[in-house]
Amino acid sequence: MKTILKQYQSHFIKGVTFATMSFLMLLSCSDFLEPDDPFGQIPYVEIFEDEATATAAVTTLYAKLRDDVLLTGNSSGLSVRMGLYADELDFYGMPGESAFEIYQHQIIASNSAVQSTWNSTYNLIHMANAALEGLEKSEALSQNLKNQLRGESLFIRAFSHDYLLNLFGDIPYITSTDFELNKDVSRLPQNTVYEFILTDLNEAKSLLGENYIGEERTRVNKAGISALLARVHLYLGNWQEAEAQSNSVISNTALYSLEPNIENEFLINSNSAILQFKPKNFGTNTHEASTFIFISVPPPFLALTNSLVEAFEENDLRRTHWIDELNDGNQTWYHAYKYKATGNTGMSLEYSIVFRLAEIYLIRAEARAMQNNLQGALQDLNTIRARAGLENAVAGSQTDLITAILNERRFELFTEHGHRWFDIKRLNKASQILSPIKPGWRETNTLWPIPEADLLINPNLQPQNPGY
């Protein structure tokens, strides 16, 4: 693997397009730090010569994910964009907005949401690489701290590439901040990108400990790496490895257990949480609550689709606790209500969850079912159903069981970081599910286009994805 990486590094696995890199070159060290951080003016070369500023540089990578990139709970995050793209969310904003084009499956290569997703993610990858390079050169930090911060930075790099891969298909895998090497970057086959993702994650897992840094679950530990590894191996069809990585999390009962009361699932002290985002300011809560909750109808921006709400089984506690509704006397609209606290509540009540135990149970259930361990798969599936107040599922065949697991993922993970879209895409069900309800649907919509501006500046990113 290291040999392959070196071969690619010499040619094109080093960066993003000229346009994106030109923007990144303008970044100062303050991009690593929270805006109010007093270390924001420290010269870059000194950041990794001090424990506090080096730690701030790496922890701000999480802040970027929380506020700007991929997993942000605001309208630019994948919970919204892919919820609209799939069958979770209806759009009520203005026609002509990039979100409307996503909802209607009318995306073109110049769509601003496509461009911002690409650029902001590669921006974050650039920052992770800068952290890795700074840590490598540092002579002042202890080896234990360097290992911790390197593991976290590798996680962010792999995590970001994984989402880009599932959105765009073949992509560059960026491992350097060197502009000259990056300006002619080319795309790599998906299998090669996955190899690099796994290499980064396996190294990160070897560097991180079982316990969290601090009292909260806001910095990734070994279990967080296993959670992402389990997901990656599931998507790759490596069933044994997906099960093994899931086992390593589920078996850690000292740290993780399903919250028996689903009302507690998204609170800051949830035992189900494997990794969370802490709000920027003390007392504030999640972007998700502000984005999904509406207090007037018709909704100003988005609402859950009726088809999702109506598909819940009777007496499903997730329907009654994680969905709320408003009625104007004639019509009812529904919104996600997993996160309930908006604004500043004096003390933060909820943190945005990146990984939680329920997903890991469902990954293991699917991995077991694909290995024909139907009893073990049913056990995991019914663990989730029991917490939701439902009777045990009974599946007579492997096909029926896999369908039941996919349905359970729909009800358990709705409006969380695009799970629904990525599930129907990877299981080749997107056309079956979306073509009857999305007039603009085409088979080629399983991938987003490479941004037009990047293709024009860097021909090495050609060819464009089919259909665009």
Image (tube, grey):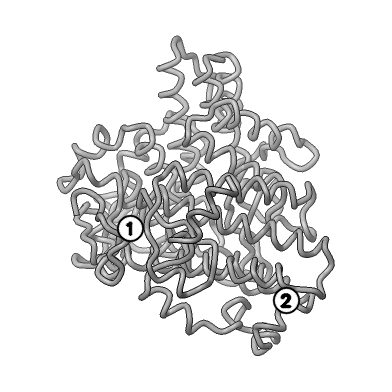
Q: Quadrant of residue 400?
A: top left
Which one is closest to the eye, mark 2 or mark 1?
Answer: 2
Badge 1: residue crowd in 10 Å (few <14, some 14–19, many ≥20): many
Give the structural element (helix, strand or loop) at label 1.
Answer: strand
What's under tag 2, amino acid-wise? Phe
Q: Quadrant of residue 308?
A: top left
Tag 1 residue: 302
Tag 2 residue: 48
- Identify which residue is drawn at 44% across, 24% down: 404
What's under tag 1, amino acid-wise? Leu
For this orientation, the residue located farthest to the left is 439
Q: Position of residue 241 (x, y in %)?
A: 60, 30
- 370 shown above or below 461: above
Label 1 near label 2: C-beta < 8 Å? Answer: no
**Is residue 115 found left or right of 222 in the rendered image?**
left
**Is residue 231 found left or right of 397 in the rendered image?**
right
Q: Position of residue 335 (x, y in %)?
A: 40, 52
For this orientation, the residue located farthest to the top is 396
- Identify which residue is drawn at 30% across, 48% down: 447
Q: Nearer the viewer, residue 377 or 195?
A: 195
Who comes first in sequence, dot 2 or dot 1?
2
Q: Nearer the viewer, residue 454 or 225?
A: 454
Badge count: 2
- 175 shown above or below 310: below
Q: Position of residue 322 (x, y in %)?
A: 50, 46
Q: Quadrant of the C terminus?
A: bottom left
- 132 shown above or below 311: below
Q: Nearer the viewer, residue 251 or 14?
A: 14
